[in-house]
């Protein structure tokens, strides 16, 4: 029985009848770094090229990281867990996030596929440019993307490794409770900060 349960959690069922479309629903965990580390480097270089010093770059980078943590929280809470009462909406929810809750240890669906992450990154770069202007948007966006990579790889790690540090163990406990106890709690994956702020820590962590 335990083996069957483990096999189910690690299964990778097709999401689309088309093999071509289904290919893009899976991604090797190395791909986000291959795609986005050069983006981070270019954005940081652009900041230096425009005359920012190291402290200014670091400050804007840190601001981008903080913005990511808030974005991660609300994307997970409002978008990934939005379950409209309609067959098409339910299908979209399953494709976006429901399949991950059904098969949370599928190693090829634990990081975001480029077919989704690249358009989202382009959208956020546009928003950063509108809000902050250039060149300020570039180092800030670099921090934002670094936060996204931290999220993707923290997520992968929490599902496939057992952390040794106290902070890592708490992150894993909260995320596992999100999966297996109550998905209305524990929306922060790479950081629990906004779960503290908005009162959505997993129950045992909150009561402990």
Image (cartoon, helix red, strand yellow):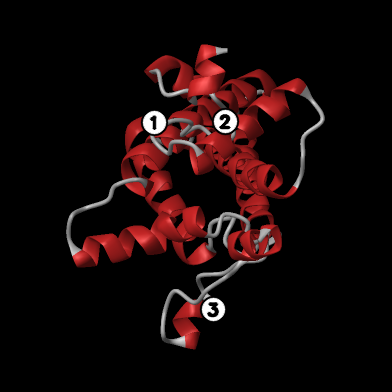
Image location of residue 41, percent across then percent down: 67, 45
The residue positioned farthest toward the top in the image shown? 208
Looking at the image, residue 94 lies above or below residue 183: below
Residue behind mark 3: 23
What distance separates the C-alpha of mark 1 from that of mark 2?
34 Å
Residue behind mark 1: 132
Left or right: 4 with respect to 175?
right
> Going 68% across and 57% down the picture, which residue do you hit?
2
Looking at the image, residue 193 lies above or below residue 142: above
Q: Is 168 or 131 nearer to us in this picture?
A: 168
Q: Secondary structure at mark 2?
A: helix
Q: Secondary structure at mark 1?
A: helix
Q: Secondary structure at mark 3?
A: helix
Q: Earlier in the sequence, mark 3 or mark 2?
A: 3
> Going 44% across and 29% down the picture, which residue do you hit?
70
Q: Earlier in the sequence, mark 1 or mark 3?
A: 3
Residue behind mark 2: 174
Image location of residue 80, percent across then percent down: 38, 48
| Badge 2 density bin: few <14, some 14–19, many ≥20, Cα 10 Å | many
Q: Nearer the viewer, mark 1 or mark 2?
A: 2
| Badge 3 density bin: few <14, some 14–19, many ≥20, Cα 10 Å | few
Choose top left, top right, bottom left or bottom right for residue 128.
top left
Image location of residue 48, percent across then percent down: 64, 34
Query: In this orientation, does residue 129 appear?
Result: no
Instruction: Determine whether label 1 and label 2 are within 8 Å by CB.
Output: no
Q: Is 65 or 191 nearer to us in this picture?
A: 191
């Amino acid at each position: 029985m335990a083996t069957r349960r483990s096999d189910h959690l690690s299964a990778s069922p097709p999401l689309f009848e088309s093999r071509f479309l289904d290919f893009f629903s899976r991604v090797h965990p190395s791909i986000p770094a291959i795609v986005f580390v050069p983006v981070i480097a270019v954005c940081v270089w652009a900041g230096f090229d425009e005359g920012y010093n190291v402290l200014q770059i670091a400050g804007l980078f840190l601001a981008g990281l903080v913005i990511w943590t808030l974005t991660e929280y609300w994307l997970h809470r409002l978008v990934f867990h939005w379950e409209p009462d309609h067959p098409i909406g339910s299908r979209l929810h399953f494709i976006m996030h429901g399949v991950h809750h059904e098969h949370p240890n599928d190693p090829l669906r634990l990081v975001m596929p480029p077919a989704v992450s690249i358009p989202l990154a382009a959208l956020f770069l546009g928003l950063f440019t509108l809000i902050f202007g250039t060149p300020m948007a570039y180092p800030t966006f670099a921090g934002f993307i670094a936060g996204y990579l931290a999220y993707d790889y923290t997520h992968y790690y929490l599902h496939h490794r057992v952390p040794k540090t106290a902070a890592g163990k708490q992150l894993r406990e909260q995320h596992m409770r999100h999966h297996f106890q109550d998905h209305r709690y524990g929306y922060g994956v790479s950081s629990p900060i906004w779960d503290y702020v908005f009162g959505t820590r997993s129950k045992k962590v909150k009561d402990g």
